Amino acid sequence: MPTATDRRQWFRALPPLADTDAAAIERFLDAAWAEGGLAQATLAAYRSDLQGLARWLSREARPGLPQARREDLFAYLAVRAGLGYRARSTARLLSCLHAFFAQALRRGERHDDPTALLQAPNLPRLLPKALSEAQVAALLEAPQLATPAGLRDRAMLELMYAAGLRVSELVGLPGTAVNLRQGVLRVVGKGGRERLVPLGEESRHWLERYLRDARPALLRGARQPAASVGLFVEPGGGTPSRQAFWALVKRYAQAAGIDPARVSPHGLRHSFATHLLNHGADLRALQMLLGHSALSTTQIYTLVARDRLRNLHARHHPRG
């Protein structure tokens, strides 16, 4: 069975991207951002998907990306299936291709849609993996507070759990995002949608300590002014990446005695939602806090907040 390393090596071995394909991809992404307000992470994923297809078409001496035929796309999907790409990755690729060629039709650059018969695979409904409240408490207490980086990590973990942030939202927070006096956080989420999230006493306390004691120390020697960098910083003024935050969550999970395989940054967001529901939060309010555009996305948490639902049934049903 091919591994992720095999897939990376296959991708790296493809020929360079042709200039015409690169221009077509950037034109599509610019329009997708302007019209749909897609998040930067989605745009980056679409760019990678389209570049992979374009480079493969070039290697196989097939038409360039804007002229790709249905049989070319079927052949590429077959290659990806042989390399063991997951169904979710293929579904994202197909979504990207549908949008790319739909835009080409609107522009009059094509008169047919080669994706017309391509259907996304059926995806299993994945339930969020939430930690228990005791496990979350142990994870939050794992960072060593004797160093500025440890204090920063504690503030990041506390804020992610208190506000239910996506990891991209957390590491991308500007320095002006937090208002400690009012106790709220301004978050720009998917599609550029903005929301205000209450901080809570604990996260507010750790943010105050971080901003007072750790951030100035981490920014010491930085070339750019403090106001121009993100809320959370690396030594010297850089911004922690999503991958770096993922690694530190795994490290602190191990230190807290939690199986690292069960913990991820997104798991803290799931835990935030599940614990709120277990303590009686309204689903509509949770939708606003999570920044979901549709309530149906939030409703999946009702499947994991079982304890709360059982208690509600027992307390309010006449035969409970």
Image: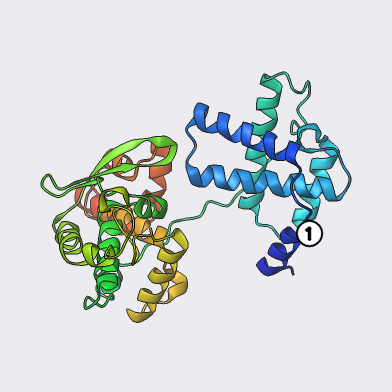
Q: Which residue is at the far left?
A: 181
| 71, 68: nearer the viewer | 68
- The vertical placement of 177 against 99, above or below, is below
Image spot of residue 224 (x, y percent):
33, 54
Residue 149: quarter of image: bottom left
Q: Nearer the viewer, residue 39 or 70?
A: 39
SS of the residue under disc 1? helix
- Left or right, 153 with respect to 27, comes to left
In the depicted structure, whether residue 299 falls above or below residue 259:
above
Kind of residue sitting beneath label 1 = Gly
Q: State the residue at coordinates (79%, 50%).
A: 56
Residue 96: percent from left, percent from top? 63, 39
Q: Residue at x 35, y 53 (%)?
A: 170
For disc 1, the marked residue is: 82
Q: In this orientation, which residue lies closer to the viewer: 284 or 42?
A: 42
- View extreme (right): residue: 61
Residue 118 seen in render: no
Residue 24, given in percent of the width and then of the height, sits at 69, 34
Q: Can residue 74 be seen by looking at this rendering?
A: yes
262 left or right of 158 in image = right
Q: Position of residue 86 (x, y in %)?
A: 65, 57
Vertical arrangement, residue 297 with respect to residue 304, above or below:
above
